Image (spheres, coloured by chain):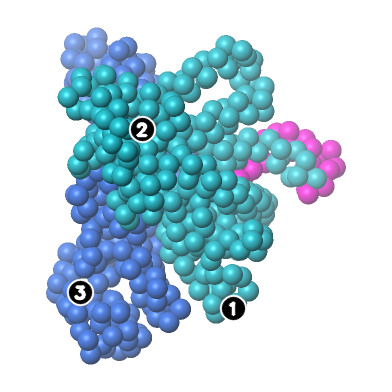
Chain colours: A cyan, B blue
Amino acid sequence: MFTYFLRRFLILCLTLLGITFVTFMLIKTLPGDPVQGLIGERAEQETVERIRKELGSDQPFVRQYRGYLKFIVTGDLGTSYYTNRKVVDDLKAKCLHTFELAFAAMLFASLSGILLGTLMAVTRGSILDRLGLLISAGGISLPVFWLGLTLMLIFAFLIPLLPPSGMGEGELIYLILPASTLGINSAAYIVRITRSSLLEVLSQPYITTARSKGLTKRKVVLKHALKNALLPIITLIGLDFGSYLNGSVLTETIFGWDGVGRYAVEGIMRRDYPVVMGTVLVGAAFFVFINFLVDLIYLYLDPRIRVRE
Amino acid sequence: MEWEKIINHLKKNPWVLTSLIIILILILVATFAPLLSPYDPLEINLDSLKFSPSLSHLFGTDSKGRDILSRVVFGARYSLFIGFAVTFTSLTIGIILGAFAGYLRGKVDTVITVVIDLMLAFPSLLLAIGISVTLPPGIFSVFLALTLVGWAPFARLIRGVVLSLRELQFVDAAKAIGCSPLRILFLHILPNCLPLTIVVASLKIGSFILSESALSFLGLGVQPPLPTWGSMVSLNRTYLLSCPWMIIFPGLAIMVTVLVFNIIGDSLRDYLDPHLKL
């Protein structure tokens, strides 16, 4: 148990190191001066000199990378070309908004996905089942940005129920459209995995036993089957966190949500390299960290892993 | 016999047959775009600004008077090219690296696995964005970014399958009659990965097309005025309320294309191996 944790933690640290290596290579291939690509054009002269001493292309490669690491470890991700603010400060301010959105989307996706998937598995082969399969195939194939605009057109303009964009004063009503847009792809996957996982469990002998004991079908599905079918579903929900990070880039842009994704897009539009690279680095780091947490939760949920370890 | 089975399978699944026909039509449309599109997709026409869909402009026109149908038709070229080219290239890289890692084990395996894990540690679109900002925007940068991100899942999958296949008896038999390691790997082991490879490839085409449209939407893909589906949605966003057709049709084109590839992928999976879990 403890060695498992230790090993996972070691892998976590190595992966984080690897991520910085990849972003370092990306920054080095940026057009123009990599030092400016990292800290921004309007940085003070002495900072530029200091960074150049550590990272400049006249230094050997390993030395440059070490300089970059030192730069990151001190909590500095460079300065935006455009606003001249520190990228770290901007990211700190915006990541809470992104988490709020991602959490709402995850909640929406999990609830609707598990509900629909369960109904489909129970009524296998019915019209509802076929319709659900079609909807989930459509949900996987939808471009997020287009879905967002279409929902906005329908529910904010044609039937003015919801605010089209912005965050208001943090009222929940502003969350509905962006969260359902961001969650739809994930919901479609959850529907599928819930359906197949539940169908598999329902064919097990202990389900027949429970039924022959005289338990109602509802009770068997909810109490016996769903509980055992839940493990792959939870894994999927956790491991799908990357899709929320990917999707937030598009969703936040469309709905004017002041989070990390929109920040990155503004960086792309202005070719503001420190902003883009800072977001990629932090986004990947979060993703790795979440995967690490999912592994730990999995360890807690599935006693079989604990025994094997 | 095999053909009869396939035809039976198609008869039972009308969706699959429809999807196959749609893919065929899409490929024909993309190939013969100049012949099929009613107007020049790039021609700015001040006499036909923001026309709603009508008989002369089936999908309407955009804010510069360009015919949307013609632009959607030409946009199919970029989307399909990226879908097929990225799948083919990243699959080739993935098969070669995954096969060597799984078959040779040892140091080669360790190095390749570390690289794979590192690539998978990034959220895919975020990494593709990071790669494409370092390149001059255009179709090649989209291709390169998506390939660099896309090979890793293939490699991991193939590595896993090769790892389990190499322990089977037919490999021992091949070794016993003196086959070289390369011959065993490419002529005995890899052909057994073929069904799985076909399924995964067909499922991935759609997701690459989606990623291309996202990059185009963000302005990192093929540059305007050239028409891609993603950039059409992005550039016409300001007219969402007044001229929704400018956005609806390119978006529908993306969705239908991705959907038909996904349906084919799903049905191939069911047909080749119903127990396969992906």
Do the residues under discs 1 and 3 have CB atoms within 8 angstroms?
Answer: no
Residue under numbered circle 2: B119
Q: Which of the chains bears the disc numbered 3?
A: B
Residue under numbered circle 1: A159
Residue A238 seen in the current view: yes
Task: Looking at this view, name the residue that lies furthest to the left.
Answer: B35
Residue A135 belongs to magenta span: no
Q: Is residue A22 above or below residue A146?
A: above
> Which of the marked residues, 2 or 3, is nearer the chain's N terminus?
3
**Image location of residue B103, percent across then percent down:** 30, 18
Q: Amino acid at mark 1?
A: Ile
Q: Which residues are magenta?
A: A192-218
**Image location of residue B267, percent across then percent down:** 41, 51
Q: Which of the chains bears the disc numbered 2?
A: B
The residue depicted at 49 percent of the width and 42 percent of the height is: A89
The residue depicted at 61 percent of the width and 12 percent of the height is: A2
Number of residues whose C-alpha sits closer than 10 Å to that of mark 3, classed few (under 14), some (14–19) or many (20 or more) = many
Position of residue A289 in the picture relative to residue B94 (left or right): right
Residue under numbered circle 3: B41
**Image location of residue A52, percent across then percent down:** 25, 29
Do the residues under discs 2 and 3 have CB atoms within 8 angstroms?
Answer: no
Number of residues whose C-alpha sits closer than 10 Å to that of mark 2, classed few (under 14), some (14–19) or many (20 or more) = many
Q: Amino acid at mark 3?
A: Pro
Q: Is residue B130 above or below residue B43?
A: above
Q: Amino acid at mark 2?
A: Met
What secondary structure is marked by label 2? helix
Do the residues under discs 1 and 2 have CB atoms within 8 angstroms?
Answer: no
Residue A215 belongs to magenta span: yes
The residue depicted at 30 percent of the width and 61 percent of the height is: B23
The residue depicted at 32 percent of the width and 86 percent of the height is: B51
